Image (tube, grey):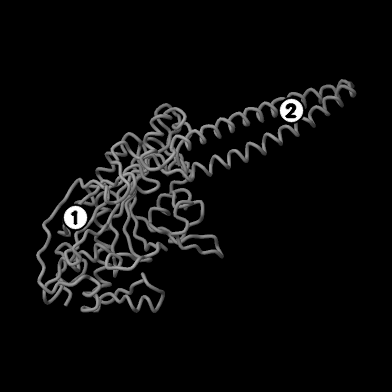
Protein backbone atom coordinates (compact mmCIF):
# COMPACT_ATOMS: atom_id res chain seq x y z
CA UNK A 1 0.00 0.00 0.00
CA UNK A 2 1.34 3.41 -0.95
CA UNK A 3 2.24 5.84 1.83
CA UNK A 4 0.12 9.00 1.87
CA UNK A 5 3.06 10.97 3.26
CA UNK A 6 5.14 10.03 0.20
CA UNK A 7 2.33 11.02 -2.16
CA UNK A 8 1.98 14.34 -0.37
CA UNK A 9 5.70 15.15 -0.18
CA UNK A 10 6.67 13.82 -3.64
CA UNK A 11 3.45 14.39 -5.54
CA UNK A 12 4.95 15.04 -9.00
CA UNK A 13 7.29 12.05 -8.81
CA UNK A 14 4.49 9.78 -7.59
CA UNK A 15 2.19 10.86 -10.44
CA UNK A 16 4.94 10.35 -13.03
CA UNK A 17 5.75 6.85 -11.78
CA UNK A 18 2.13 5.83 -11.29
CA UNK A 19 1.27 7.06 -14.79
CA UNK A 20 3.46 4.27 -16.18
CA UNK A 21 0.90 1.71 -15.11
CA UNK A 22 -2.50 3.41 -14.83
CA UNK A 23 -4.59 6.10 -16.48
CA UNK A 24 -5.68 9.28 -14.64
CA UNK A 25 -2.90 8.95 -12.07
CA UNK A 26 -2.99 12.67 -11.28
CA UNK A 27 -6.73 12.57 -10.53
CA UNK A 28 -6.33 9.53 -8.29
CA UNK A 29 -3.45 11.08 -6.34
CA UNK A 30 -5.43 14.33 -5.93
CA UNK A 31 -8.38 12.32 -4.59
CA UNK A 32 -6.14 10.52 -2.11
CA UNK A 33 -4.61 13.76 -0.87
CA UNK A 34 -8.01 15.47 -0.60
CA UNK A 35 -9.40 12.57 1.44
CA UNK A 36 -6.30 12.63 3.65
CA UNK A 37 -6.67 16.38 4.21
CA UNK A 38 -10.32 15.86 5.20
CA UNK A 39 -9.35 12.98 7.47
CA UNK A 40 -6.69 15.04 9.24
CA UNK A 41 -9.05 18.01 9.62
CA UNK A 42 -11.75 15.80 11.13
CA UNK A 43 -9.18 14.25 13.47
CA UNK A 44 -8.11 17.73 14.61
CA UNK A 45 -11.71 18.78 15.24
CA UNK A 46 -12.48 15.58 17.14
CA UNK A 47 -9.35 15.95 19.25
CA UNK A 48 -10.27 19.56 20.01
CA UNK A 49 -13.78 18.51 21.05
CA UNK A 50 -12.34 15.78 23.29
CA UNK A 51 -9.90 18.22 24.89
CA UNK A 52 -12.67 20.75 25.55
CA UNK A 53 -14.86 18.03 27.05
CA UNK A 54 -12.07 17.06 29.44
CA UNK A 55 -11.58 20.67 30.56
CA UNK A 56 -15.31 21.24 31.07
CA UNK A 57 -15.75 17.94 32.93
CA UNK A 58 -13.07 18.95 35.43
CA UNK A 59 -14.68 22.40 35.79
CA UNK A 60 -18.11 20.84 36.41
CA UNK A 61 -16.65 18.68 39.17
CA UNK A 62 -15.12 21.69 40.85
CA UNK A 63 -18.36 23.70 40.58
CA UNK A 64 -20.36 20.91 42.19
CA UNK A 65 -17.81 20.66 45.00
CA UNK A 66 -18.03 24.41 45.65
CA UNK A 67 -21.86 24.31 45.62
CA UNK A 68 -22.29 26.22 42.33
CA UNK A 69 -24.92 23.78 41.08
CA UNK A 70 -26.60 26.17 38.61
CA UNK A 71 -23.34 26.93 36.76
CA UNK A 72 -22.46 23.24 36.75
CA UNK A 73 -25.83 22.32 35.23
CA UNK A 74 -25.40 24.88 32.43
CA UNK A 75 -21.98 23.48 31.61
CA UNK A 76 -23.42 19.93 31.55
CA UNK A 77 -25.78 21.08 28.80
CA UNK A 78 -22.76 22.32 26.86
CA UNK A 79 -21.04 18.95 27.26
CA UNK A 80 -24.07 17.21 25.78
CA UNK A 81 -23.77 19.36 22.64
CA UNK A 82 -20.01 18.72 22.50
CA UNK A 83 -20.56 14.96 22.82
CA UNK A 84 -23.01 15.07 19.91
CA UNK A 85 -20.48 17.09 17.90
CA UNK A 86 -17.71 14.66 18.77
CA UNK A 87 -19.84 11.70 17.64
CA UNK A 88 -20.53 13.45 14.33
CA UNK A 89 -16.80 14.07 13.84
CA UNK A 90 -16.03 10.47 14.77
CA UNK A 91 -18.57 9.03 12.31
CA UNK A 92 -17.30 11.28 9.51
CA UNK A 93 -13.70 10.41 10.37
CA UNK A 94 -14.45 6.69 10.25
CA UNK A 95 -16.21 6.97 6.88
CA UNK A 96 -13.44 9.11 5.39
CA UNK A 97 -10.69 6.82 6.70
CA UNK A 98 -12.49 3.77 5.31
CA UNK A 99 -12.89 5.43 1.91
CA UNK A 100 -9.22 6.48 1.86
CA UNK A 101 -8.03 3.02 2.90
CA UNK A 102 -10.11 1.33 0.19
CA UNK A 103 -8.69 3.65 -2.45
CA UNK A 104 -5.14 2.97 -1.26
CA UNK A 105 -5.73 -0.80 -1.30
CA UNK A 106 -6.83 -0.52 -4.93
CA UNK A 107 -3.72 1.42 -6.00
CA UNK A 108 -0.74 -0.56 -7.40
CA UNK A 109 2.82 0.01 -6.30
CA UNK A 110 4.91 2.77 -7.86
CA UNK A 111 7.21 1.30 -10.53
CA UNK A 112 10.92 1.77 -9.99
CA UNK A 113 12.31 4.50 -12.30
CA UNK A 114 14.22 1.84 -14.27
CA UNK A 115 11.04 -0.06 -15.21
CA UNK A 116 10.57 0.20 -19.00
CA UNK A 117 7.31 1.61 -20.32
CA UNK A 118 5.05 -0.88 -22.02
CA UNK A 119 1.58 -2.35 -22.23
CA UNK A 120 2.16 -6.12 -22.28
CA UNK A 121 4.73 -8.91 -22.07
CA UNK A 122 5.83 -8.02 -25.60
CA UNK A 123 7.37 -4.85 -24.16
CA UNK A 124 9.50 -6.58 -21.52
CA UNK A 125 13.23 -5.95 -21.79
CA UNK A 126 15.61 -8.90 -22.12
CA UNK A 127 18.64 -8.19 -19.93
CA UNK A 128 20.49 -11.53 -19.90
CA UNK A 129 20.65 -14.86 -21.76
CA UNK A 130 22.53 -18.06 -20.98
CA UNK A 131 23.08 -21.41 -22.68
CA UNK A 132 22.81 -22.83 -26.16
CA UNK A 133 19.52 -24.24 -27.39
CA UNK A 134 19.88 -28.07 -27.55
CA UNK A 135 19.56 -29.79 -30.92
CA UNK A 136 16.95 -32.52 -30.46
CA UNK A 137 16.27 -35.57 -32.60
CA UNK A 138 13.61 -35.46 -35.31
CA UNK A 139 10.97 -37.22 -33.21
CA UNK A 140 11.35 -35.04 -30.13
CA UNK A 141 8.12 -34.62 -28.15
CA UNK A 142 6.66 -32.00 -25.83
CA UNK A 143 6.55 -32.98 -22.17
CA UNK A 144 2.87 -33.98 -22.12
CA UNK A 145 3.61 -36.67 -24.71
CA UNK A 146 6.78 -37.73 -22.91
CA UNK A 147 4.71 -38.05 -19.72
CA UNK A 148 2.54 -40.65 -21.47
CA UNK A 149 5.42 -42.45 -23.16
CA UNK A 150 7.31 -42.97 -19.89
CA UNK A 151 4.24 -43.07 -17.59
CA UNK A 152 5.59 -40.39 -15.23
CA UNK A 153 2.77 -37.82 -15.12
CA UNK A 154 -0.92 -38.66 -15.53
CA UNK A 155 -3.03 -35.66 -16.48
CA UNK A 156 -6.18 -37.71 -17.16
CA UNK A 157 -6.04 -39.37 -13.74
CA UNK A 158 -5.72 -35.96 -12.07
CA UNK A 159 -8.71 -34.78 -14.07
CA UNK A 160 -10.69 -37.79 -12.83
CA UNK A 161 -9.77 -37.17 -9.20
CA UNK A 162 -10.17 -33.40 -9.15
CA UNK A 163 -10.31 -31.68 -12.54
CA UNK A 164 -8.07 -30.17 -15.19
CA UNK A 165 -4.86 -28.64 -13.87
CA UNK A 166 -4.28 -31.17 -11.05
CA UNK A 167 -1.82 -33.79 -12.41
CA UNK A 168 -0.72 -37.00 -10.70
CA UNK A 169 3.07 -37.60 -10.69
CA UNK A 170 4.06 -41.26 -10.85
CA UNK A 171 7.19 -43.36 -10.36
CA UNK A 172 10.31 -41.61 -11.57
CA UNK A 173 8.23 -38.51 -12.30
CA UNK A 174 7.30 -38.23 -8.62
CA UNK A 175 10.89 -38.91 -7.57
CA UNK A 176 12.24 -36.27 -9.96
CA UNK A 177 9.72 -33.79 -8.56
CA UNK A 178 10.86 -34.57 -5.01
CA UNK A 179 14.51 -34.36 -6.07
CA UNK A 180 13.99 -30.87 -7.47
CA UNK A 181 12.32 -29.70 -4.26
CA UNK A 182 15.18 -31.01 -2.10
CA UNK A 183 17.83 -29.65 -4.46
CA UNK A 184 16.25 -26.17 -4.48
CA UNK A 185 15.93 -26.12 -0.68
CA UNK A 186 19.53 -27.27 -0.23
CA UNK A 187 20.78 -24.56 -2.58
CA UNK A 188 18.76 -21.93 -0.73
CA UNK A 189 19.83 -22.95 2.76
CA UNK A 190 23.46 -23.11 1.62
CA UNK A 191 23.04 -19.48 0.52
CA UNK A 192 21.94 -18.45 4.01
CA UNK A 193 18.17 -18.74 3.70
CA UNK A 194 16.48 -20.15 6.80
CA UNK A 195 14.11 -22.98 5.92
CA UNK A 196 10.58 -22.87 7.32
CA UNK A 197 7.36 -24.81 6.83
CA UNK A 198 4.22 -22.69 6.69
CA UNK A 199 0.44 -23.21 6.58
CA UNK A 200 -1.10 -23.80 3.15
CA UNK A 201 -4.19 -21.76 4.00
CA UNK A 202 -4.25 -18.16 5.23
CA UNK A 203 -6.75 -15.74 6.71
CA UNK A 204 -8.01 -12.57 5.07
CA UNK A 205 -5.55 -10.33 6.94
CA UNK A 206 -2.65 -12.29 5.45
CA UNK A 207 -4.10 -11.92 1.94
CA UNK A 208 -4.33 -8.15 2.42
CA UNK A 209 -0.88 -8.02 4.00
CA UNK A 210 0.96 -9.18 0.88
CA UNK A 211 -1.42 -7.63 -1.66
CA UNK A 212 -3.25 -10.69 -2.99
CA UNK A 213 -6.43 -9.12 -1.63
CA UNK A 214 -8.33 -7.37 -2.97
CA UNK A 215 -6.39 -7.48 -6.27
CA UNK A 216 -6.43 -11.25 -6.89
CA UNK A 217 -9.43 -12.35 -4.86
CA UNK A 218 -11.05 -14.11 -7.82
CA UNK A 219 -7.86 -16.07 -8.53
CA UNK A 220 -7.63 -17.61 -5.05
CA UNK A 221 -9.48 -20.69 -3.82
CA UNK A 222 -11.74 -19.65 -0.93
CA UNK A 223 -12.79 -21.94 1.93
CA UNK A 224 -16.07 -20.22 2.76
CA UNK A 225 -16.96 -22.13 5.92
CA UNK A 226 -13.81 -20.90 7.65
CA UNK A 227 -13.14 -17.66 5.75
CA UNK A 228 -9.71 -18.91 4.68
CA UNK A 229 -7.83 -18.92 1.37
CA UNK A 230 -5.61 -21.60 -0.17
CA UNK A 231 -2.24 -19.98 -0.77
CA UNK A 232 -1.30 -18.93 -4.32
CA UNK A 233 2.39 -18.92 -3.29
CA UNK A 234 4.53 -19.49 -0.21
CA UNK A 235 5.25 -15.76 -0.23
CA UNK A 236 1.90 -15.08 1.45
CA UNK A 237 2.24 -17.05 4.71
CA UNK A 238 6.03 -16.57 4.92
CA UNK A 239 5.92 -12.78 4.55
CA UNK A 240 3.05 -12.52 7.03
CA UNK A 241 5.37 -13.88 9.71
CA UNK A 242 6.52 -10.26 9.89
CA UNK A 243 3.07 -8.67 10.09
CA UNK A 244 2.81 -6.17 12.99
CA UNK A 245 6.52 -6.61 13.80
CA UNK A 246 8.86 -3.83 14.93
CA UNK A 247 12.42 -4.85 14.07
CA UNK A 248 15.74 -3.39 15.07
CA UNK A 249 18.09 -2.08 12.38
CA UNK A 250 20.57 -4.78 13.44
CA UNK A 251 18.06 -7.52 12.62
CA UNK A 252 18.56 -7.16 8.85
CA UNK A 253 18.61 -9.08 6.64
CA UNK A 254 15.90 -11.67 7.24
CA UNK A 255 16.22 -14.49 4.68
CA UNK A 256 13.66 -17.31 4.50
CA UNK A 257 12.96 -20.21 2.15
CA UNK A 258 9.95 -22.48 2.06
CA UNK A 259 8.47 -25.25 -0.04
CA UNK A 260 4.69 -25.26 -0.54
CA UNK A 261 2.06 -26.42 -2.95
CA UNK A 262 0.40 -23.43 -4.64
CA UNK A 263 -3.24 -23.10 -5.67
CA UNK A 264 -4.53 -20.74 -8.37
CA UNK A 265 -7.96 -20.52 -9.91
CA UNK A 266 -6.70 -18.56 -12.94
CA UNK A 267 -8.75 -19.58 -15.95
CA UNK A 268 -6.81 -21.51 -18.56
CA UNK A 269 -7.38 -21.06 -22.27
CA UNK A 270 -6.97 -23.74 -24.89
CA UNK A 271 -3.84 -24.40 -26.95
CA UNK A 272 -0.33 -25.78 -26.62
CA UNK A 273 0.82 -22.82 -24.51
CA UNK A 274 -1.32 -24.02 -21.58
CA UNK A 275 -1.11 -27.79 -22.14
CA UNK A 276 0.43 -30.21 -19.70
CA UNK A 277 2.55 -28.54 -17.03
CA UNK A 278 2.48 -25.13 -18.71
CA UNK A 279 -0.44 -23.94 -16.57
CA UNK A 280 -1.81 -25.71 -13.51
CA UNK A 281 -4.26 -24.99 -10.71
CA UNK A 282 -2.06 -26.82 -8.19
CA UNK A 283 1.73 -26.89 -8.42
CA UNK A 284 4.80 -27.03 -6.20
CA UNK A 285 7.17 -24.14 -5.65
CA UNK A 286 10.20 -23.33 -3.53
CA UNK A 287 10.26 -19.68 -2.50
CA UNK A 288 12.90 -17.31 -1.18
CA UNK A 289 12.10 -14.02 0.55
CA UNK A 290 14.01 -11.27 2.25
CA UNK A 291 13.24 -8.40 4.61
CA UNK A 292 15.82 -5.68 4.12
CA UNK A 293 16.85 -2.21 5.22
CA UNK A 294 15.67 0.21 2.49
CA UNK A 295 19.26 1.19 1.68
CA UNK A 296 20.18 -2.43 0.94
CA UNK A 297 17.13 -3.82 -0.84
CA UNK A 298 18.30 -3.38 -4.43
CA UNK A 299 21.65 -5.03 -3.64
CA UNK A 300 19.58 -7.85 -2.16
CA UNK A 301 17.49 -8.04 -5.34
CA UNK A 302 20.66 -8.41 -7.42
CA UNK A 303 21.87 -11.15 -5.06
CA UNK A 304 18.56 -13.02 -5.45
CA UNK A 305 18.81 -12.79 -9.23
CA UNK A 306 22.37 -14.14 -9.13
CA UNK A 307 21.24 -16.97 -6.85
CA UNK A 308 18.54 -18.14 -9.27
CA UNK A 309 20.99 -17.81 -12.18
CA UNK A 310 23.37 -20.17 -10.38
CA UNK A 311 20.67 -22.82 -9.95
CA UNK A 312 19.65 -22.75 -13.61
CA UNK A 313 23.25 -22.88 -14.76
CA UNK A 314 23.86 -25.97 -12.60
CA UNK A 315 20.80 -27.56 -14.22
CA UNK A 316 22.31 -26.60 -17.61
CA UNK A 317 19.02 -25.23 -18.89
CA UNK A 318 19.04 -22.41 -21.46
CA UNK A 319 17.37 -19.37 -19.92
CA UNK A 320 16.90 -15.65 -20.23
CA UNK A 321 16.05 -12.84 -17.81
CA UNK A 322 13.47 -10.16 -18.57
CA UNK A 323 12.96 -6.86 -16.79
CA UNK A 324 9.19 -6.51 -16.72
CA UNK A 325 7.66 -3.43 -18.28
CA UNK A 326 5.08 -1.29 -16.49
CA UNK A 327 2.16 -3.02 -18.19
CA UNK A 328 3.29 -6.53 -17.15
CA UNK A 329 4.49 -5.63 -13.65
CA UNK A 330 2.75 -7.33 -10.75
CA UNK A 331 0.33 -5.23 -8.69
CA UNK A 332 2.56 -5.08 -5.61
CA UNK A 333 5.98 -4.95 -7.27
CA UNK A 334 8.28 -1.97 -7.81
CA UNK A 335 10.71 -3.96 -9.97
CA UNK A 336 10.53 -7.56 -11.22
CA UNK A 337 12.89 -9.81 -13.15
CA UNK A 338 11.33 -12.86 -14.81
CA UNK A 339 13.38 -15.96 -15.61
CA UNK A 340 12.34 -18.02 -18.61
CA UNK A 341 13.63 -21.44 -19.65
CA UNK A 342 13.64 -22.33 -23.33
CA UNK A 343 11.60 -25.41 -24.19
CA UNK A 344 13.16 -26.82 -27.33
CA UNK A 345 10.35 -29.29 -27.98
CA UNK A 346 7.73 -26.53 -27.78
CA UNK A 347 10.02 -23.91 -29.36
CA UNK A 348 9.03 -21.30 -26.79
CA UNK A 349 10.12 -19.66 -23.56
CA UNK A 350 8.53 -20.81 -20.29
CA UNK A 351 8.44 -18.53 -17.24
CA UNK A 352 9.89 -20.35 -14.25
CA UNK A 353 10.69 -17.60 -11.73
CA UNK A 354 9.90 -14.02 -10.78
CA UNK A 355 12.20 -12.10 -8.45
CA UNK A 356 10.72 -8.85 -7.12
CA UNK A 357 11.37 -5.90 -4.83
CA UNK A 358 8.19 -4.52 -3.28
CA UNK A 359 10.01 -1.72 -1.45
CA UNK A 360 7.64 -0.47 1.31
CA UNK A 361 4.39 -1.48 -0.42
CA UNK A 362 3.83 -4.75 1.45
CA UNK A 363 5.50 -3.47 4.63
CA UNK A 364 2.98 -0.62 4.86
CA UNK A 365 0.10 -3.11 4.66
CA UNK A 366 1.84 -5.44 7.10
CA UNK A 367 2.85 -2.64 9.50
CA UNK A 368 6.37 -4.05 9.29
CA UNK A 369 8.73 -1.46 10.68
CA UNK A 370 12.19 -1.11 12.19
CA UNK A 371 13.84 1.40 14.51
CA UNK A 372 16.48 3.45 12.73
CA UNK A 373 19.60 4.96 14.31
CA UNK A 374 17.57 7.96 15.51
CA UNK A 375 15.16 5.70 17.34
CA UNK A 376 12.36 6.49 14.89
CA UNK A 377 10.37 3.76 13.16
CA UNK A 378 10.56 3.27 9.38
CA UNK A 379 9.00 0.81 6.97
CA UNK A 380 11.22 -2.08 5.91
CA UNK A 381 11.54 -3.37 2.34
CA UNK A 382 10.29 -6.84 1.35
CA UNK A 383 11.47 -8.99 -1.58
CA UNK A 384 10.61 -12.44 -2.84
CA UNK A 385 11.39 -14.83 -5.64
CA UNK A 386 10.64 -18.29 -6.98
CA UNK A 387 13.58 -20.58 -6.43
CA UNK A 388 11.99 -22.28 -8.30
CA UNK A 389 8.50 -23.05 -9.58
CA UNK A 390 8.61 -26.74 -10.42
CA UNK A 391 6.18 -27.47 -13.29
CA UNK A 392 7.94 -25.57 -16.06
CA UNK A 393 11.41 -26.43 -14.77
CA UNK A 394 10.34 -30.07 -14.92
CA UNK A 395 8.90 -29.51 -18.40
CA UNK A 396 12.18 -27.93 -19.51
CA UNK A 397 14.22 -30.85 -18.17
CA UNK A 398 11.98 -33.49 -19.77
CA UNK A 399 12.00 -31.77 -23.16
CA UNK A 400 15.58 -30.52 -23.34
CA UNK A 401 17.17 -33.68 -21.90
CA UNK A 402 15.24 -36.16 -24.04
CA UNK A 403 17.04 -38.54 -26.40
CA UNK A 404 15.57 -41.02 -28.87
CA UNK A 405 15.47 -43.74 -26.19
CA UNK A 406 15.20 -42.05 -22.81
CA UNK A 407 15.31 -38.83 -20.79
CA UNK A 408 18.59 -38.00 -19.13
CA UNK A 409 18.71 -36.49 -15.64
CA UNK A 410 20.80 -33.33 -15.06
CA UNK A 411 24.03 -34.37 -13.40
CA UNK A 412 23.47 -32.18 -10.35
CA UNK A 413 20.17 -33.97 -9.63
CA UNK A 414 21.42 -37.57 -9.83
CA UNK A 415 22.41 -37.70 -6.12
CA UNK A 416 18.84 -36.64 -5.32
CA UNK A 417 16.99 -38.95 -7.75
CA UNK A 418 19.15 -42.05 -7.39
CA UNK A 419 18.91 -42.65 -11.16
CA UNK A 420 20.48 -41.01 -14.18
CA UNK A 421 17.74 -41.47 -16.77
CA UNK A 422 14.06 -42.15 -17.29
CA UNK A 423 13.38 -45.05 -19.67
Question: Residue at point 57% right, 41% down?
Answer: 99
Q: Earlier in the sequence, mark 1 or mark 2?
A: 2
- Name the quadrant of the C terminus: bottom left
| Left or right of residue 365: residue 308 | left
Instruction: Determine whether, in the image, residue 266 is placed left or right of residue 95.
Output: left
Does 294 sit left or right of 393 as displayed? right
Identity of the residue drawn at 34% across and 56% down = 258
Instruction: Say which residue label 2 marks.
Output: 53
Q: Nearer the viewer, residue 145 or 31?
A: 31
- State whether residue 63 is above or below residue 232: above
Q: Which dot marks residue 319?
A: 1
Residue 100: image location, x then y, percent? 54, 39
Res 334 quadrant in image: top left
Expressed as whole percent of the image width and height from the top left, the position of residue 42 reads 63, 31
In-front residue for pair 363/113: 113
Which quadrant of the figure has residue 36? top right
Other residues around mark 2 within 10 Å, as few (<14) / some (14–19) / many (≥20): some
Pick the quarter of the image with the N terminus.
top left
Q: Are marks 1 and 2 in contact (CB under 8 Å)?
A: no
> How far from the left and from the top, in percent, is residue 348?
21, 61
The image's mark for residue 139 is none
* Residue at image coords 33%, 68%: 270
Q: Secondary structure at mark 1?
A: strand
| Image: 252 above or below 311 | above
SS assignment at label 2: helix
Residue depicted at 85% across the width and 24% down the height:
72
**Pick the front one: 61 or 85:** 85
Q: Residue 77 at x, y = what percent?
A: 83, 29
Nearer mark to the viewer, of 1 and 2? 1
The image quarter containing residue 92 is top right
Amino acid sequence: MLQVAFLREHKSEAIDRLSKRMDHAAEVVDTVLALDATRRNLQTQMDAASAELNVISKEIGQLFKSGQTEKATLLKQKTAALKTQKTTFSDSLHATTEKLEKLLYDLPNLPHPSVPNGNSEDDNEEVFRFGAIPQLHDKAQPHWELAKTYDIIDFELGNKITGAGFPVYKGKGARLQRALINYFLDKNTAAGYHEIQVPHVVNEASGYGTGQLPDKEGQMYFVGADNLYLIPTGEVPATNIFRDVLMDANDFPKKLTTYTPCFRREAGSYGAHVRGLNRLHQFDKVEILRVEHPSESYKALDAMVDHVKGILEELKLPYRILKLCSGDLGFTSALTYDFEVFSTAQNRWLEISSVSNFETYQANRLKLRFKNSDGKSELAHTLNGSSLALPRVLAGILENYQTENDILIPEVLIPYTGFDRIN
